[in-house]
Amino acid sequence: MLATPGGLPPTGQDTRWAYETKHDGQRAVIYLPGDGSVVLRARSGEDITAAYPEFGALGGALGQVPAVLDGEVLVLDEQGRGDFQLLQSRMGLARSPARASRRAAETPAHLVLFDVMFLRGDLTSLPYVGRRRELEGLALGGPFWSTPSALVGHGELALRATRESGLEGLVCKRLDSVYEPGVRSRSWIKIRNARTVDVIVGGWVPGRGRLSGLPGAVLVGQRDAGRLRYAGSVGTGWSEAERSELAELLRAAETDSCPFDGVPPVAAAHWVTPRLVGEVRYSTRTRAGLLRQPSWLRLRTDLAPDDSAADFP
């Protein structure tokens, strides 16, 4: 079951919803046949069990009781938050058990459990509150897995808490909703915490197809002790007219010299004098400071490059 992007439920319906932390990880369905084994499958249906050997002991956690659980695989940072960049070093190793074991010792994963679809029988037609009661009754907590609590009501408070904690976002789940396998349902609403930052445009790459002759993406950076550090590329957020206007500004500022401190590994890059400032929305940053899932918001004509207060982290 998948969540639909949206916002908080209306205030008058707040108590009809539960609120769970949205995590930045790899979704997985966990099969516990009741024979001591465990099988993890990704959203694609791929068997990813061998990629996460630290979850093997979960197979015996319920004894001989068969169950199917829903969850998210994370790798936690120093603050206990899911870090997708760290997780990437663990993904894709299902066919390399030896490498997976070495990575598990270096960068252990953690499994967050948030739903149960089968427990001695099919529970998908049971309302969320009933499934949640069954899940919490299993008391599944261990060195590499946990069952975080859900908050009923108080959606604004829950959303604010995720923002203040630097978490990915919030998932709102209607209390009377059944589990709909494979469906992107309005009974589950996901809210991604977006951050904004001012960036300086230092280059661009040509678009393709219908964007031929226009910038496909701009290359942006932020000041760091007087240097312009590369912060990634932004390729969405413009209307066709805005992209055409941006193309004219970029051509007028074109230069042969890369303005970034260190040439970014970007093919077919065109460099510009770093005088355009833009505001960008993004989800999180990589450990190298690159913006994840950036989207252009607006050109900051009110700011000069040296006025930008958003220095490189």
Image (cartoon, grey):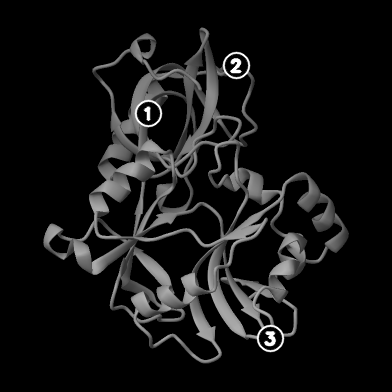
| Gap between marks 1 and 3 measured at Cα | 52 Å
Residue in view at x 38 percent, y 66 percent: 3
**Label 1 element class:** strand
Please indicate whether residue 74 sits to the left or right of residue 184 in the image.
right
Q: Check disc 1 and report the residue beneath it.
A: 197
Say which amino acid is labelled 3. Answer: Gln
Which of the image's four quarters has the N terminus?
Answer: bottom left
Lower position in the chain sequence, tag 1 or tag 3: 3
Q: Which mark is residue 64?
A: 3
Task: Inspect this view and state whether residue 279 appears.
Answer: yes
User: x, y (%) of residue 215?
Assistant: 43, 38
Residue in view at x 14 percent, y 57 percent: 11
Depth order, front residue of 87/156: 156
Say which amino acid is labelled 2. Answer: Asp
Q: Which mark is residue 261?
A: 2
Disc 2 + disc 3, Cβ < 8 Å: no
User: x, y (%) of residue 133?
Assistant: 41, 75
Say which amino acid is labelled 1. Answer: Val
Depth order, front residue of 16/93: 16
Seen in the picture, residue 80 relative to 49 is either above or below; the reply is above
